[in-house]
Image (cartoon, rainbow, N blue to C red):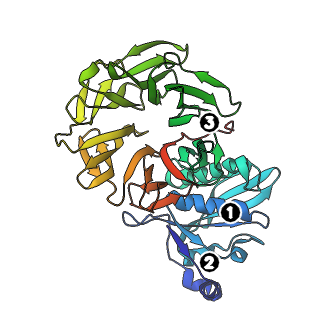
Amino acid sequence: MKRLIGMAALVLILSAPLTAQDGVRTGISYGPPGVRPGIAVVAAPGLDSVRTIIERDLGFSDRFEVIFLPDSATRLSGPPPLGVYRVLGALQVVELQLASGGIEVKLHDVPKSAVVQQGVRLMDRSGVGDGRLAIHRVSDEIVSWVTGAPGIAATRILVKLERGDRTDDGIWRVDSDGANLTRVSRTGGITQSPVWHPDGNRVAFTEMRDHVGTIILQSLSTGTRVTIPTTTSGLNYSAAISPDGTKMAFAKSVEEGTDIYEVNLANMCCAHRLTTVGRLADNLSPTYSPDGRRIAFISTRGGQPGLYVMDADGSGQTPMVFEADPKASSQAPEWSPDGTKIIFHRDLAGGRQINVLDVGRRTVRALTNTGRNEDPSWAPDSRHVVFKSNRGGRDQLWVLDIESGSMRQISTPGGARVPAWSPPLSMATP
């Protein structure tokens, strides 16, 4: 959400006597449920790009009503006029000043007329290329300062792009705000099922060559590629990596059927099968719980693809969403980072839509109802979801805030498929 303040309105506010601003609020209050606190970002000359990125990030967090002012009104020549921002409805003002090698950030509590957080952050202030990640980290820090919740700005999304020319198809990554699109996989071949390693520096995906689907683990910083053992025959896909990074679960399709296997990533060995239904059913799309103790997956053992959960060793396989309708199916589950929910897409008579399972209550609700929507992936805050949708006329990425229902598109060239949202990315991330 954002609030646009025109120049005429701003002039009226600036000319209002300060006595009219007294007693508006005495402390930070979020108001009724669903009402977002107002926030504004102001900056010293030379920091317009940084300010613009932070404003956009705070808006995309869906936790604030961002007050957007004309550029000339947000360039500071002295301390920020907190009285003005109080009239505009801001509870917080973010002040950005030049500092050696970066910026100084101050968070002002407007009702208290006090600086409540501040610090110097090193960064490239141009707002271009990979250096943008440091600016996104400042945005996430502001979100944490104000709300105590994690931000999602310093993250990236993996996506398979289909651009009409196979040499351009492949796995790409894009910043959470839709900028900085960069190729990850090599040209040629067919790729699918991208997934992040928990370290944020490696990714895994399936690469189809010579009728074999092999899982590749690739470093983003060096480009070094490792072939996962036991994936050099048959079709191996829909990989998931355990939260501690030591294990990988994946689906393996051979003549006998499709089952879920797990391999020891730390030692690159010891692959073993977790499901053994064989020809009677297919088992695929594993996803680990955040504590690594359970795995959710899709199985057709009940007739139609349904959502199941098992212990990480393969025991205790239990249905969570059983599809009794022969025309219904569940697909592409992913466990939320907070462990309370599983997101997935569901085919019903009305089309393919994003659904969410409350793990504790075992209740399901639909999150979308327009277009064809599939392949959802959680942001680190367990509140935002990225998925593929054709609601705009072609397959593109869309981000949904499941609390407010707000939606935004991430535009990509060509068709977008199977997105995967990264964990928070550290300073060492390339």
Q: Which residue is mark 1?
A: 51
Nearer to me, 205 or 398:
205
Nearer to me, 309 or 233:
233
Occupied quadrant, residue 169: top right
Mark 2 or mark 1, which has the lower sequence index? 1
Q: Which residue is mark 3?
A: 188
Amino acid carrying label 1: it is Arg
Q: Which residue is mark 2?
A: 84
At mark 3, the secondary structure is loop
The answer to whether residue 29 is above or below residue 8 is above
**Left or right: 164 in relation to 63:** right
Nearer to me, 74 or 181:
181
Identify the residue at image location x=61%, y=76%. 83
Quarter placement of the C terminus: top right
Tell me residue 170's x, y (percent): 58, 41
How far apart, in angstroms, are the residues tagged by discs 1 and 3?
40 Å
How far apart, in angstroms, are the residues tagged by discs 2 and 1?
19 Å
